[in-house]
Image: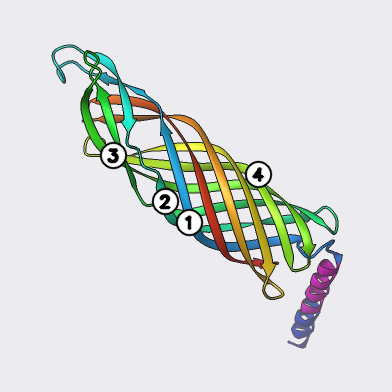
């Protein structure tokens, strides 16, 4: 038992010494791992291009035909959100770090509406119209975060990287369906130490999502395809832990 206690004490002292050596070996105070939680407000603005609808025979008359679709009165989303993030800052020198980080927004946004129109090819007027509801969920990003070390308690940083999101859509004529969008994200932020390990932060992020073809089926028999893209902006405040 005595040998076990001595071994445990030796291991503890070795771990403390290693931790102290690691802390002393840091080029600046912001080098190392971090994890944080944020809350804030986000906005998403979609762009839905004119699409096509393949109407089978018997739905409108006895002949199958292809026509166009339009999306009108599409509202932007404004929603509260939460954010989980973590990463590692590599020290370039005593004044600069280059971080790599990952971020995830759990849950789904509030919904917004738009009108989906299937156009009558003979008159150019809507053949049918239905109000659809959409939301945004599963937002994530992977970024490089160059930062300026103001001092051991303050860090200003930028973000650039890859982002993705899922658009969910449904209406009285369309069962719930999803489309995944990807693009790039840019951000700016500031961190302020509150204790020796905990910090507060504020951040603003912008995302540009590229075009993706969304495929849905209206009324159970009419396949519709349209190109979807969008932009998003969010503002976050929160707290984190610097290891």
Residue 160: mark in rendering: 4
Q: Earlier in the sequence, mark 1 or mark 4?
A: 1
Where 65 sits versus 51, above or below?
Answer: above
Residue 2: image x %, image y %?
77, 88
Q: Earlier in the sequence, mark 3 or mark 1?
A: 1
- Specify the segment rendered in magenta: 12-24
| Relative to 237, 189 lies left or right | right
Q: Which residue: 64% across, 52% down?
A: 188
Quarter occupied by residue 55? top left
Confirm or deny contact between disc 3 and disc 2 (CB under 8 A).
no
The label nearer to you, 2 versus 4, is 2
Secondary structure that dominates the magenta span: helix
In the rendered image, residue 1 lying in the magenta stretch gets the answer no
Q: CA distance from mark 3 to mark 1?
A: 23 Å
Residue 132: mark in rendering: 3
Where 212 sits versus 76, above or below?
Answer: above
Mark 1 lies on a secondary structure that is: strand
Residue 41: mark in rendering: 1
Disc 2 residue crowd, few under 14, some 14–19, many 20+, Cα 10 Å: some
Residue for badge 2: 78
Confirm or deny contact between disc 2 and disc 1 (CB under 8 A).
yes
Q: Earlier in the sequence, mark 2 or mark 4?
A: 2
């Amino acid at each position: 038992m005595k040998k076990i206690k001595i071994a445990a004490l030796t291991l503890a002292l070795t771990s403390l010494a290693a931790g102290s050596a690691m802390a002393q070996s840091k080029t600046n105070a912001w080098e190392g791992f971090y994890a944080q939680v944020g809350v804030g407000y986000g906005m998403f603005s979609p762009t839905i291009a004119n699409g096509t609808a393949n109407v089978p025979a018997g739905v409108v008359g006895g002949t199958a035909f292809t026509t166009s679709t339009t999306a009108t009165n599409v509202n932007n989303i404004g929603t509260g959100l939460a954010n989980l993030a973590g990463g590692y800052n590599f020290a370039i020198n005593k004044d600069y770090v280059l971080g790599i980080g990952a971020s995830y927004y759990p849950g789904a946004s509030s919904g917004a509406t738009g009108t989906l129109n299937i156009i009558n090819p003979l008159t150019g007027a809507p053949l049918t119209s239905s109000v659809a509801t959409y939301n945004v969920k599963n937002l994530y990003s992977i970024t490089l975060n160059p930062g300026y070390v103001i001092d051991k308690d303050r860090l200003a940083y930028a973000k650039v990287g890859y982002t993705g999101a899922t658009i969910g859509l449904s209406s009285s004529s369309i069962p719930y369906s999803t489309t995944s969008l990807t693009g790039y994200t840019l951000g700016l932020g500031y961190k302020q130490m509150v204790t020796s390990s905990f910090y507060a932060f504020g951040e603003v992020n912008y995302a540009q999502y590229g075009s993706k073809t969304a495929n849905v089926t209206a009324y159970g028999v009419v396949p519709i395809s349209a190109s979807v893209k969008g932009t998003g902006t969010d503002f976050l405040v929160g707290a984190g832990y610097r290891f």
